[in-house]
Image: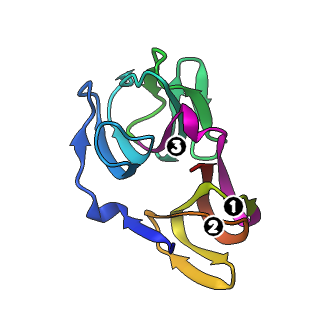
Amino acid sequence: MSWHVVHLADVTATHWRNGGGLTRELVAEPAGADWQWRLSVAEVAADGPFSRFEGVTRWFAVLQGAGVVLNEHRLTAQDAPLCFDGGAATDCRLIDGPTQDFNLMLRGNCLPARMVRIHGQAQELAHASKCIAVYAVSPRASVEFNGQHLGVPPATLIWRKLTKAATVNIQCEHALWMEWSA
């Protein structure tokens, strides 16, 4: 299987289930309401509660803006992503104006999982039966996978399912690396 590429600019924004912001769903597998995993970019323009997703583990990272406070956790675009229970009551307070944020949401059989920020270079060993993804925040990322090189423009997601272990080399100014059980 090859890389899937999704440019944020090509995805239509939809309102949150609770009406508190906009989301661009980059990919959900399977498609529809019964997804097992989902990656999206949200625009938060006002303080308020997050939509609740019972039975979902959620990873959250600020991409742009001054940041947010989720319950007691202060997050900026420099902080590590936060993992939390998507079914828990989560209140969001903007630190100083609107933000753009990345979400990785997973149902139980997709765990374990992780999301990390990358600045500069990273080498990741991904195991078989995993999904892996890179989201280029700015300005461009370069990904090498089994000898294949791929340039990733800003605000672009690449993802794939692995059938065997692989080493992934990433070079970027700022990107997110994600992996979860397939």
Q: Residues within 10 Å of mark 2 (few under 14, many from 20)?
A: some
Q: Is residue 103 magenta?
A: yes
Q: Is residue 42 magenta?
A: no
Q: Is residue 79 visible in this depiction of the protein?
A: no
Magenta stretch: dominant secondary structure: strand
Q: Residues within 10 Å of mark 3 (few under 14, many from 20)?
A: many
Give the labeled residue for mark 3: 62
Q: Specify whether 115 is left or right of 105.
A: right
From this view, report whether residue 171 is shown above or below residue 36: below
Q: CA distance from mark 2 to mark 1?
A: 5 Å
- Which residue: 24% across, 49% down? 13
Where is residue 62? Give x, y as percent: 52, 43
Where is residue 142? Give x, y as percent: 61, 76
- Which residue: 61% across, 63% down? 162
From this view, report whether residue 120 is shown above or below residue 90: below
- Residues at badges 2 and 1 in contact (C-beta under 8 Å)? yes
Secondary structure of the residue carrying numbered label 3:
strand
Viewer-nearest residue: 107 or 65: 107
Where is residue 172? Give x, y as percent: 64, 69
Three-letter amino acid code of the residue under disc 1: His
Q: Is residue 126 visible in this depiction of the protein?
A: yes
Give the labeled residue for mark 1: 119
Where is residue 32? Give x, y as percent: 28, 43
The image quarter in which residue 100 lies: top left
Q: Which residues are magenta?
A: 100-124
Q: CA distance from mark 2 to mark 3?
A: 15 Å
Q: Earlier in the sequence, mark 2 or mark 1?
A: 1
Give the labeled residue for mark 2: 173
- Residues at badges 2 and 3 in contact (C-beta under 8 Å)? no
